[in-house]
């Protein structure tokens, strides 16, 4: 997984030469749509209507990316219709800049979420946080309440019934923006085929340079009590660590 994250800048430069995404441009603006149809995070179209309420982007006929949100989560579908077989090294990833403050290197409010196939049937979901100069060590995304799934089941996919790789993500809003107003974050989503090629939203992104990422505006704000709960939980966790350190015997 660390190797995949380290190779992202090189992979993106290679893939920019391939005409596989219709969306392009620094500062590309996206507005999410409000969730109406529930999402089952199982790595496929559970029903033909599951993602019809999402804002969708046709990636040049190579795939389709959709987004929608509610007060609790952002839901992301990466439907890579041209990747006909899951293989080790295939992956989808999402980048976001929590404060939308850009920069020339990943900062501590920047996150890199990747779902990577380790074999043809197993994959790993990891997340890395910026350090100010690079991406830090990856850790299980579940530690932040993020879930994801992938499959090659296209039975209900309205874009292609041929078997192909599809990825689904559900990311807590408190991890994305932690705000009680409708906010905008830096954003990118895409997928890479280990054999070559990929789909991207937007095109022209360097994973190491938040200034090149697009901008995503949420359709629904986070309720104030959710932010308060998150803040209190953080304070309690911090206080617990401080108290444990004070209670530890001196060396």
Image (spheres, rainbow, N blue to C red):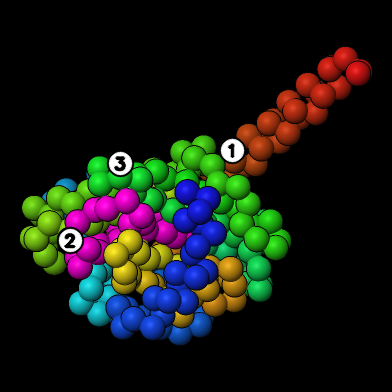
Q: Residue tagged by mark 3?
A: 122
Say which label, 1 or 3, has the lower sequence index: 3
Discs 3, 2 touching: Cβ within 8 Å = no
Q: Could one spot residue 224 in this view of the protein?
A: no
Q: Disc 3 to disc 2, how far (Cα)?
A: 16 Å
Kindly identify which residue carries mark 1: 229
Task: Write down the region rendered in magenta.
Answer: 71-95
Relative to the observer, which residue lies in front, 228 or 116? 116
Q: Callout 3 environment at 10 Å: few (<14), some (14 to 19), or many (20+)?
A: few
Labelled pair 1, 3 in contact (Cβ < 8 Å): no
Residue 96 x/y as whole percent: 52, 62
Residue drawn at (44%, 60%), measured in percent from left and top? Answer: 94
Q: Label 1 crowding class (10 Å Cα cut-off): few <14, some 14-19, many 20+?
A: few
Q: Is residue 36 above or below residue 233?
A: below
Spatial distance from mark 1 to mark 2, Cα to Cα?
43 Å
Please say whether residue 5 is one of the residues in the magenta stretch.
no
Q: Is residue 119 above or below residue 48?
A: above
- Quarter holding the C terminus? top right
In the visual, does 251 lie left or right of 166? right
Q: Secondary structure at mark 2?
A: loop
CA gap, disc 1 to disc 3? 35 Å
How many marks can you see? 3
Residue 75 appears at what percent x and percent y? 35, 54
- Residue 211, percent from left and from top: 59, 76
Q: Residue furthest top?
A: 249
Residue beneath label 2, please? 84
Is 83 in the magenta? yes
Under circle 1, the secondary element is helix
């Amino acid at each position: 997984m660390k190797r995949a994250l380290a190779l992202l800048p090189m992979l993106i430069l290679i893939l920019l030469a391939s005409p596989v995404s219709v969306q392009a441009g620094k500062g590309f603006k996206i507005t999410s749509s409000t969730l109406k149809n529930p999402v089952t995070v199982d790595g496929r179209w559970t029903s033909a209507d599951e993602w019809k309420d999402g804002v969708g982007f046709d990636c040049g006929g190579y795939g389709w990316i959709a987004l929608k949100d509610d007060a609790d989560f952002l839901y992301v579908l990466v439907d890579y219709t041209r990747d006909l077989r899951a293989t080790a090294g295939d992956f989808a990833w999402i980048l976001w800049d929590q404060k939308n403050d850009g920069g020339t290197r990943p900062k501590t409010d920047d996150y890199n979420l990747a779902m990577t196939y380790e074999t043809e049937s197993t994959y790993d979901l990891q997340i890395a946080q910026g350090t100010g100069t690079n991406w830090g060590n990856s850790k299980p995304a579940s530690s932040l309440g993020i879930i994801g799934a992938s499959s090659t089941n296209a039975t209900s996919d309205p874009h292609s019934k041929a078997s192909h790789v599809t990825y689904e993500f559900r990311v807590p809003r408190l991890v994305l923006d932690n705000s009680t107003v409708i906010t905008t974050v830096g954003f990118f989503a895409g997928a890479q085929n280990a054999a070559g090629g990929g789909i991207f939203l937007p095109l022209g992104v360097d994973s190491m340079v938040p200034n090149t990422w697009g901008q995503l505006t949420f359709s629904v704000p986070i309720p104030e009590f959710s932010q308060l709960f998150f803040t209190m939980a953080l304070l309690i966790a911090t206080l617990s660590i401080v108290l444990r350190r004070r209670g530890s015997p001196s060396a």
